[in-house]
Amino acid sequence: MQSKLSWQEFIITRAIKASGYSAIVFVALIFYFLLREGLPTLGEVPLGDLFAARWYPIESYFGILPLLSGSLLVTVGATLVAVPFGLGTAIFIAEIAPRWAREILKPLVELLGGLPSVVLGFLGILALAPNLRVFLNLPTGLTALTGSLLLGGIAVPTVVSVAEDALDSVPRAYREGAWALGATRWQTIWRVTLPAARSGVLTGIMLGVGRAIGETMTVMMVTGNAPVLATGLGAFFSPVRTMTATIAAEMGEVANGSVHYHTLFFIGMVLFLISLAVNVTASAMVFRSQKRAERVLS
Amino acid sequence: MTEKIQIEHLTLQYADGAESLRDISLNVRENAITVLFGPAGGGKSSLLRCLNRLNDLADVKTVSGKILLDGENILDPQTDVIALRRKVGMVFARPVVLPFSIYGNLTYGLEVMGEKRKLRLDEAVERSLRQAALWDEVKERLDDPAIALSGGQQQRLCLARALALEPEVILLDEPTSGLDPISTGKVEASLQELKKNYTILLAPHSVQQAARVADYAAFFLQGELVEFGEGKTLFTTPRQKRTEDYVTGRFG
Ligand SMILES: Nc1ncnc2c1ncn2[C@@H]1O[C@H](COP(=O)(O)OP(=O)(O)OP(=O)(O)O)[C@@H](O)[C@H]1O
Ligand SMILES: [Mg+2]
């Protein structure tokens, strides 16, 4: 009996450890693969040409700046949409909506989060883009703004879902404490509930933005795919092309081992590093606030 | 001595249907400690939470009757609830320090009122901490997170926080539950000081405490006010059999 139990323990512990480490191994393998396929670019294309403003691989122009700026523009735009909208919705569901409304809204938002991005892309092409074109009087509706709006929409459910959970787990006593001091509902939400839920809210934003950075299908469908370097805010209203869209669109047609092929992997590498940096910053922020709370509670 | 609060035929029903307060009528004197005591579920907390309308935010189905504070019915829908809560401070059974510093906890109520002058805030912090017998323990560490205080200190911080707003009435719901006898003594001593300037309503955590601090006492049993009178007489010669049983520990 004793030995059977310890056997079970042994196997379970090992299995859990193995799956934990395998996550690290997979990430390392992905990075290794990206490095192996992407780094040769540095030998084939001079750095100055790589960080140049023209992307036209057929004539051997491999400047990735337009793609970088495209991704940046669309992601920042998406964040600007997702954060206020997502937080607002989360606060509404957690703090203001009557019980019956939240019981409908919460699952609905989660359902939206599961919608395939191709479907949203379709919506973007058919509904959003033509209307934006007419409304803003633009030559085309396929712009960075269109992509931002849609990507923001994709990120919102994630932000809402995680942030709402965080707000909901703030003890009711905190709110009552603030109310009893004569704080209004808004003052309580803004000064007490939100700060108390800070780390969860931040995690939600990061997960949402992370989803937006990595999103491919939608941006490919609605941003117009013109690799033009963004030079000002006007770029929001013209077509752009993101890194993810470039990789997805061109990888299928490229000759294995060519300069173009290596450069696409190099872009993948840059993308990987950016996501890594964003994630590390986010978890450092969450971790720091957690550590402070823990130190205080001990 | 005048009557600060007059409660008339107050009945309260939560959403689950049970009446938590049944036809309560009670007058609360100014500058005295009125104790609400009785077994669990008697309705003491419910009554306290009516007095600052904190029950507005709970699942209350019906409230009827009147609560007159300085002659005005605070149950009137027209009442400015925010102003009422500044006038009627509350300290909860479990201390809820807000996720700020000690200083921030004390000034929060004033800040949401729009007070920005540092000098006024500093004054309020020191005055309220002294009133709650906490000043000497925390004066060196006002910027520390409030959650780092011990349970007893947190409880007194919550009292100080309510006092910082200079209310007229203070509601205390088991303010010394979970405190050691020394901290309990400190809180009780400050209450005796405070009653000179405030009207105090207290739900004590034991009959002994009720007997120690009560100028007036009200015995609640399952939503009903069984007996109300001066503390001295009520604890020594209760009129009702049910009060006597509870006070002498022969209950049930
Ligand atoms: N938010 C609420 N929703 C529904 N019922 C409630 C709520 N708060 C209190 N009650 C009910 O009202 C009754 C009185 O509760 P209350 O908290 O006022 O008692 P109490 O005298 O303070 O008891 P204790 O000594 O345990 O603190 C109880 O039966 C309780 O279940
Ligand atoms: Mg109670």
Image (tube, coloured by chain):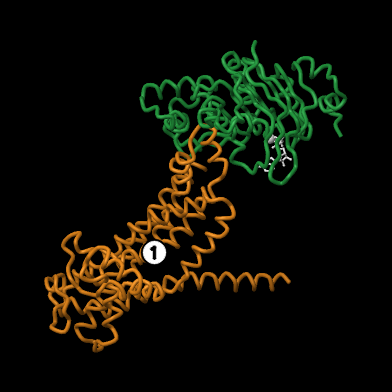
Chain colours: A orange, B green
x%, y% of residue B55? Answer: 62, 37
In depth, the one of B36 and A61 nearer the eye is B36
Image-based side of A103 in relation to A121, left or right? right
x%, y% of residue B245? Answer: 86, 27
Residue shown at 57%/26% (left/top)? B88
Image-based side of A285 in relation to A47, left or right? right
In depth, the one of A191 and A263 nearer the eye is A191
Quadrant of the image containing the N terminus of chain A: bottom right
Image-based side of A257 in relation to A151, left or right? left
Crowd class of label 1 (few under 14; some 14 to 19; many from 20; radius 10 Å):
many
The quadrant where residue B119 appears: top left
x%, y% of residue A191? Answer: 44, 40
Taking the view exactly as shown, the residue that stands out farthest to the top is B1
Which residue in the protein does label 1 denote?
A153
Chain ID of residue with mark 1:
A
Residue shown at 38%/66% (left/top)? A211
Q: What amino acid type should be assigned to the residue bearing mark 1?
A: Gly
Above or below A139: residue A297? above
Residue shown at 63%/69% (left/top)? A9
Image-based side of B32 in relation to A189, left or right? right
Above or below B167: residue B96? below
The quadrant where residue A255 appears: bottom left
Ligand 1 quarter of the rendering? top right
x%, y% of residue A251? Answer: 28, 83
Q: Is residue B41 visible?
A: yes
Regarding mark 1 in the picture, which secondary structure is present there? helix
Above or below B222: residue A170? below
